Image (cartoon, rainbow, N blue to C red):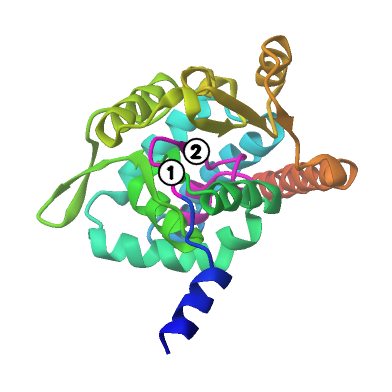
Amino acid sequence: MPDEKKALARERPARPERPAEAAFFDVDNTLMKGASLFHVARTMYARGAFSLRDAAGFAWKHAAFILRGENLSDVHAIQAAALTLATGLLTDDVRTLGNEVYDEFLESRIWPGTKALAEQHLRVGRRVWLVTATPIEIASVISDRLGLTGALGTVGEIEEGAYTGRIVGEMLHGPAKAAAVAELAQRERLDLRNCWAYSDSHNDIPLLSLVGHPVAINPDVRLRAHARTHNWPVYDFRSGRRAATLGLKLATVGGVAYGLWKGFARIRR
């Protein structure tokens, strides 16, 4: 029996560990296509949590987000609207909602290439965190379901188990991401020179510049130019579907415009 245990140990070598190394992944347009918060709002609307007008506002912001990439004003607008709509919701209900949204919408929108990169880091013993402006409850669900180490996200203020509509500190975006990762690195004793960071947005250049191995994934125009100037690796997982995706986007925007025009025509009549 002891010999059998030794044989099994030889066949399945212990997983390596690199405690001073980690990888940090943005979520929206980096790990997954589009904005995760949009799908949370979509599910809330289906449950009657807010009006069609609110839903239309989210839809337009999400369409802009996909078409032109991450824009700071859009991110703040989506976040502010979400906080307002979340006021009074119970934290337990939001966690349950997060799991339902992941199963129904998010899982199918994750880029296989980005997921493979995260899994490779885990295989060689690095810890992997998500770093996102998305609410921490949703970010934590995504991290847990993918088997990652953890998540850093925007923290909503909670009183008596319900959201107040305010945030604790500031939204985790731009320089705030870099500050949060620097704090985590100090707490976890990470050597940032031996860490990786992945993002699609020029807004995350402070985070990417913080680590020894920055990588641009599905980059916007400004991040792509910055990556080329600084010789950063660039992965674009959209390339194989670009023509079809562009056609779909144009068709979608055209369809929305036509629907609004028809709606206004009926109102005038």
Which callout, 2 or 1, points at the residue further toward the start of the chain? 2
Q: Are marks 2 and 1 in contact (CB under 8 Å)?
A: yes
Q: Which residue is mark 1?
A: 129
As drawn, 269 above or below 94: above
User: What's the residue at 9%, 55% (across, down)?
Assistant: 160
Q: Which span of residues is magenta-colored?
A: 17-40
Q: Which residue is mark 2?
A: 23
The question of residue 34 being in magenta is answered with yes
The one of 130 and 187 positioned closer to us in this rendering: 187
Q: Quadrant of residue 143?
A: bottom left
How many numbered dots are placed on residues in this image? 2
Label 2 element class: strand
Label 1 element class: strand
User: What's the residue at 37%, 29% (across, down)?
Assistant: 181
* Disc ID at residue 120: none
Q: Residue 251 appears at what percent x and percent y?
A: 83, 46
Left or right for 118, reference 152: right
Q: Is residue 247 visible?
A: no
Q: Residue furthest front?
A: 3
User: What's the residue at 52%, 51% (across, down)?
Assistant: 122
Question: Would you say the magenta stretch is mainly helix, strand or loop?
Answer: loop
As drawn, 118 above or below 25: below
As drawn, 36 above or below 48: above
Q: Residue 21 appears at what percent x and percent y?
A: 44, 36
Kind of residue sitting beneath label 2: Ala
Local crowd size for mark 2, using a 10 Å CA cut-off: few (<14), some (14–19), many (≥20): many
Kind of residue sitting beneath label 1: Trp
The one of 182 and 252 positioned closer to us in this rendering: 182
